[in-house]
Image (cartoon, rainbow, N blue to C red):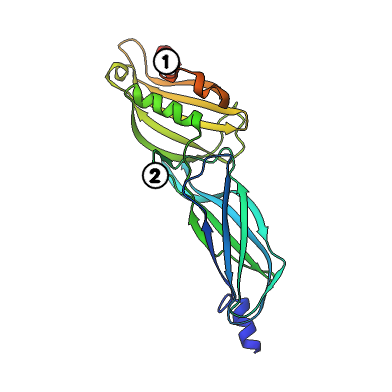
Amino acid sequence: MVFKKLLGALGVGGPSVDTVLNGGAVVPGSALAGQVLVRGGSNDAEITHVTLHFVARVEAEGGDYETQGTVAFHSQTVGGGFKLGEGQQFAVPFSVQVPWETPITEVYGQPLGIVLGVKTELAVAGAVDQGDLDPLLVRPLPAQQAILEAFGQLGFGFKSADLELGRIGGTGQTLPFYQEIEITPPPHYAHAINEIEISFIASPSGVEVVLEADKRGGMFTGGGDSLGRYTVSHQSVATTDWNAEVDGWVRRLAERRR
């Protein structure tokens, strides 16, 4: 019996978890619902807490190279304080808010290559088991989708997307990383711009849009980066001509010297 308890403390024959997320993709700021199914192991256990961690695969630049790592950006305890008998099953339902700044993983169901997940942590009488990891799918807010759709209507093409460790100065960013969506210009802008990187920083009131254009050099001018910053309210989505709005943003980027 003593050996059996020791194995349980080491995670051998201990409780297991399976997290089931309701539905498909969510949008930033909405609720993610589901349940954590806990199954007892070969001996009784006291579950002190069940915690969900939102995690992301993030890139960090270091000189001439980039590294990737996993960053937890939101945590919430959804249950705990119960005893689990040998072989017993217990369901912990939950509904947690998705942070407003959560990156987009898909547009119109097409994946962008961003990896997000929900990791379930099960604490058993002081011992912590990282347990389950489930993919988290996030689609754009209406404002984000309208802006991306406008870029597409103007002829821009998707190139890549990633998450960068760090902060964008002068914004309301709270997460330790930000998303960059890289797009390539249509022919009538290709003479001035190599590519544009889009970053969204969403909040309950709206979305900050940061555009960084990699500009081509001319005969008498050098290339370089040109920045544009805009704030869009959630209420303005249905009343804005987004093709005209975004085209104006791009024209200013192309004309701006730095």
Which quadrant of the view contains residue 110?
A: top left
Q: Nearer the viewer, mark 1 or mark 2?
A: 1
220 or 186, which is in the foreground?
186
**Res. 63 in view:** no
x then y, percent, for residue 195: 36, 26
Q: Quadrant of the N terminus?
A: bottom right
Query: Taking 85 as reference, is 189 left or right?
Result: left
Helix, strand or loop at label 1? It is: helix
Q: Residue at x 56, y 27 (%)?
A: 234
Q: Which residue is denoted by mark 2 in the rendering?
A: 113
Dot 2 amino acid type: Gly
Q: Residue at x 49, y 18 (%)?
A: 240
Helix, strand or loop at label 2? It is: loop
x then y, percent, for residue 21: 52, 55
Dot 1 amino acid type: Ala
x then y, percent, for residue 54: 56, 50
